[in-house]
Amino acid sequence: MADTTNLEVVTPSAIIVSESVEMVVVPGSDGQIGALPRHSKVISTLDRGMVDIFNDNKVSSQIMIDGGIAEINETTVTILAERAEKIDKANKQVLEEKLLAFQSQENHNDQNIAELATKNSSFIKVVLDEIG
């Protein structure tokens, strides 16, 4: 078995991924960051984009994140993201229903609710574009 690193992708509402992987590529604010086992310690802000998870020397799954923070060290890659969606597990119909619900709140009287709905709508549109 190849060397692995532990990957955790966490949002405020759930642990999206917690598994051993060969490599992770994250969308760092200054460019892509590839993390292999025994990586030096790095903390980086992340942009919206795709997290590529590698196993068996190929991309085994992808997760769309809406920015966040990554902490990388010798044994672990931890990604804290406000929003994240596993692309290979995404259900287009459920996402479309969520999008309609969020869009209906974009003009809410409470500015905080309206802003959150706009951010969620924007993220779901990107995920829907990605899954086709």
Image: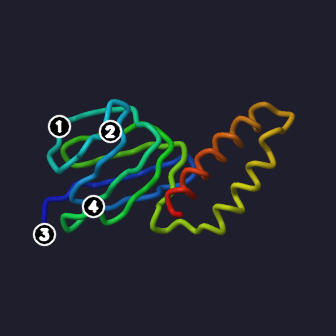
N-term-proximal mark, 4 vs 1: 4
Q: Identify the residue position indicated by label 4 in the image.
A: 20
Between marks 4 and 1, how big is the CA–CA gap? 18 Å
The secondary element bearing badge 1 is classed as loop
N-term-proximal mark, 1 vs 3: 3
Between marks 4 and 3, how big is the CA–CA gap? 11 Å
Between marks 3 and 2, how big is the CA–CA gap? 25 Å
Q: Which residue is at a point 31% across and 58% down the rendered structure image?
A: 53
The secondary element bearing badge 2 is classed as strand
The secondary element bearing badge 4 is classed as strand
Q: Which residue is at a point 47% across and 41% down the rendered structure image?
A: 48
Q: Which amino acid does label 3 sit on?
A: Met
N-term-proximal mark, 2 vs 1: 1
N-term-proximal mark, 3 vs 2: 3
Q: Which amino acid does label 1 sit on?
A: Ser
Q: Identify the residue position indicated by label 3 in the image.
A: 1
